[in-house]
């Protein structure tokens, strides 16, 4: 890599301090020339998507997350209203909560938030909280799983007395997502046990007419905010999903949206200075258009520790597809993992440099070390100097060992800059999906997993009903419910672990027996 290569390949948006360095990805002019027809098509595909075309053909849906930060782009007045009116309503609601116009029945102010959701309905708000929610006006807790021990830990952190001043935000488009439904049931039980009216402490973010919408109406929730079917969970952080909790925390959501809009404006352009397209092309080149290399995301900032996890969902759920748009089996995808720098230099960077070369790295550089003055941790050097040194040193050491990398730089972590980063990757995913001819906006694998879980729960009920005082093996019970013995065995061990059955250990699982 030469200075001239770096200087000529760097993409910069100086108006908001962003840069993208792909000089260590070894992209050459021959590659760009070969990809030109696909690039042209990708731009056309995204232009059609933003104009309101059916971009999710499997589900017959438009894809409108780009409209969320610029409602004027929405193709109809009705769609524009579906963005601007809820945004105004949620700002008004947050202001009334903060000023005590909306308050607990016991008086005072709501002091904290309990957000109940899963996937994009929790991960986006968690990223925003971790990145830009430090010192929030209302601290936030999360139920983002159906793990009862995790639920108990969060309730313990809030405390029985704290429930009275806790505002619950339940997020589910359909209202039927099991994990979110379970979390809401658990939360309601805790409020009931404390003698509190759950509905008067709750807000719903959901689809109009959904099961959750109906429940919220019945229980007298304080407010309901809509989720639209043209916004997918993994791209919902700039919809009511992310903006309701962010506004309640006192985060500058206008700046957050403005950052994404600014990035959209730059990455909507054709030509070589499009950072999202350059990212998508780098991914394509690294993995031969087949995802043959993993993406390791290393943000060198503690506040961005969840960014790799956020990108894991955005990229893997969008691009991990069995079939392309023509119905051919392609098994596409890019695996994403990461933590943060320089922590990872004391963890898996050892393998990255010396082990199997099955990845490329995306470094996220935040140029500003801290607000305020820094001390010298040794003569002439601050902690920020060390962080920069570790980033640059790791980048060079990896490249010297034949490992490629991308470096994205922002001036500091602010609502605007976080919005810009999210916007950058959302469009890169859209571009890449077009380059490899897949539908980035559905998730059939997720739905298959939900169906399998439902089947297990149905079997669990049958197995539970067959338990008697007489000990029986899994195979014997399986015969009575016409099921696979291994599936039945897992039902039985689950029941035994949770006090609903007794287990007598045999020489192997086939000889284990179970009873009431």
Image (spheres, rainbow, N blue to C red):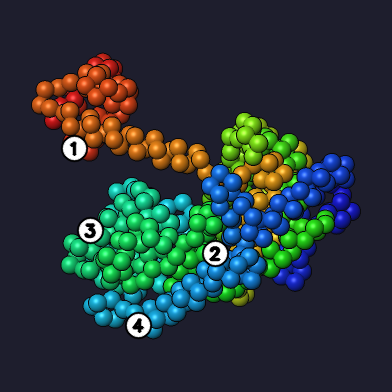
| Of marks 2 and 1, the one in the foreground | 2
Please tell me which residue is depicted at 59% across the width and 49% down the height of the picture.
56
Name the residue tied to disc 2: 238
Mark 4 or mark 2: name the one nearer the start of the chain: 4
The residue carrying pointer 1 sits among few (fewer than 14), some (14 to 19) or many (20 or more) residues within 10 Å by Cα, namely few
The Cα–Cα distance between marks 2 and 1, rounded to whole angstroms, is: 43 Å
| Of marks 1 and 3, the one in the foreground | 3
Residue 66, visible in the rendered structure: yes
Q: Which residue lies furthest to the left in this view?
A: 469
Pick the residue in front: 418 or 44. 44
Q: Is residue 438 above or below residue 124?
A: above
Q: Check residue 499 in the rendering and tell me which mark sits there, or answer none.
A: 1
The Cα–Cα distance between marks 4 and 3, rounded to whole angstroms, is: 26 Å
On the picture, is 261 further left or further right than 221?
Answer: right
On the picture, is 418 further left or further right than 357?
Answer: left
Q: Circle 1 — which element?
A: loop
Residue 308, visible in the rendered structure: no
Q: Position of residue 355 (x, y in %)?
A: 65, 33
Q: Check residue 131 in the rendering and tell me which mark sits there, or answer none.
A: none
Q: In this view, does 356 lie above or below 307?
A: above
Q: Do the residues labelled 2 and 1 touch (CB within 8 Å)?
A: no
Mark 4 or mark 3: name the one nearer the start of the chain: 4
Q: Position of residue 312 (x, y in %)?
A: 56, 47
| Of marks 4 and 2, the one in the foreground | 2
**Image quadrant assignment for residue 420:** bottom right
């Amino acid at each position: 890599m030469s200075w001239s290569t770096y200087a000529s390949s760097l993409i910069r948006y100086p108006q908001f301090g962003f840069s993208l360095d792909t000089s260590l990805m070894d992209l050459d002019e021959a590659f760009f020339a070969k990809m030109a027809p696909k690039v042209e098509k990708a731009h056309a595909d995204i232009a059609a998507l933003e104009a309101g075309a059916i971009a999710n053909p499997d589900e017959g849906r438009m894809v409108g997350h780009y409209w969320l930060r610029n409602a004027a782009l929405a193709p109809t007045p009705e769609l524009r209203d579906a963005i601007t009116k809820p945004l105004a309503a949620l700002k008004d609601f947050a202001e009334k909560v903060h000023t005590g116009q909306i308050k607990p029945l016991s008086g005072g102010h709501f002091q904290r938030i309990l957000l109940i959701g899963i996937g994009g309905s929790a991960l986006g708000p968690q990223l925003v909280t971790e990145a830009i929610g430090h010192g929030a006006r209302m601290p936030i807790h999360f139920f983002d799983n159906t793990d009862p021990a995790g639920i108990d830990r969060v309730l313990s952190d809030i405390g029985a007395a704290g429930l009275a001043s806790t505002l619950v935000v339940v997020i589910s488009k359909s209202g039927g997502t099991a994990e979110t439904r379970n979390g809401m049931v658990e939360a309601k039980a805790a409020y009931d046990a404390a003698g509190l009216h759950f509905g008067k402490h709750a807000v719903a973010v959901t689809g109009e007419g959904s099961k959750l919408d109906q429940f919220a109406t019945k229980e007298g929730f304080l407010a309901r905010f809509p989720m639209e079917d043209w916004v997918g969970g993994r791209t919902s952080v700039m919809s009511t999903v992310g903006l309701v909790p962010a506004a309640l925390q006192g985060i500058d959501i206008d700046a957050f949206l403005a950052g994404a809009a600014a990035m959209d404006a730059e990455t909507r352009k054709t030509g070589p200075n499009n950072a999202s397209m350059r990212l998508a092309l780098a991914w394509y080149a690294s993995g031969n258009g087949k995802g043959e290399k993993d993406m390791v995301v290393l943000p060198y900032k503690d506040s961005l520790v969840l960014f790799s996890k956020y990108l894991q969902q955005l990229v893997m759920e969008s691009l991990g597809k069995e079939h392309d748009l023509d119905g051919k089996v392609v098994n596409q995808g890019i695996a994403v993992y990461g933590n943060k720098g320089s922590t990872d230099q004391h963890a898996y960077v050892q393998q990255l440099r010396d082990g199997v070369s099955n990845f490329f790295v995306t470094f996220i550089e935040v140029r500003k070390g801290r607000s305020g003055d820094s001390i010298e941790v040794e003569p002439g050097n601050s902690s920020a100097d060390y962080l920069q040194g570790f980033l640059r040193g790791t980048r060079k050491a990896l490249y010297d060992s034949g490992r490629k990398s991308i470096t994205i730089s922002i001036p500091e972590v602010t609502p605007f800059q976080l919005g810009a980063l999210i916007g950058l990757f959302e469009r890169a995913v859209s571009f890449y999906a077009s380059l490899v001819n897949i539908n980035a906006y559905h998730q059939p694998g997720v739905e298959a997993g939900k169906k399998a879980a439902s089947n297990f729960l149905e079997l669990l009920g049958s197995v539970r009903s067959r338990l008697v005082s007489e000990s029986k093996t899994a195979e014997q019970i399986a015969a009575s419910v016409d099921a696979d013995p291994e599936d039945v065995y897992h039902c039985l061990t689950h029941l035994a672990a949770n006090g609903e059955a007794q287990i007598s250990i045999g020489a192997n699982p086939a000889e284990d027996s179970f009873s009431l």
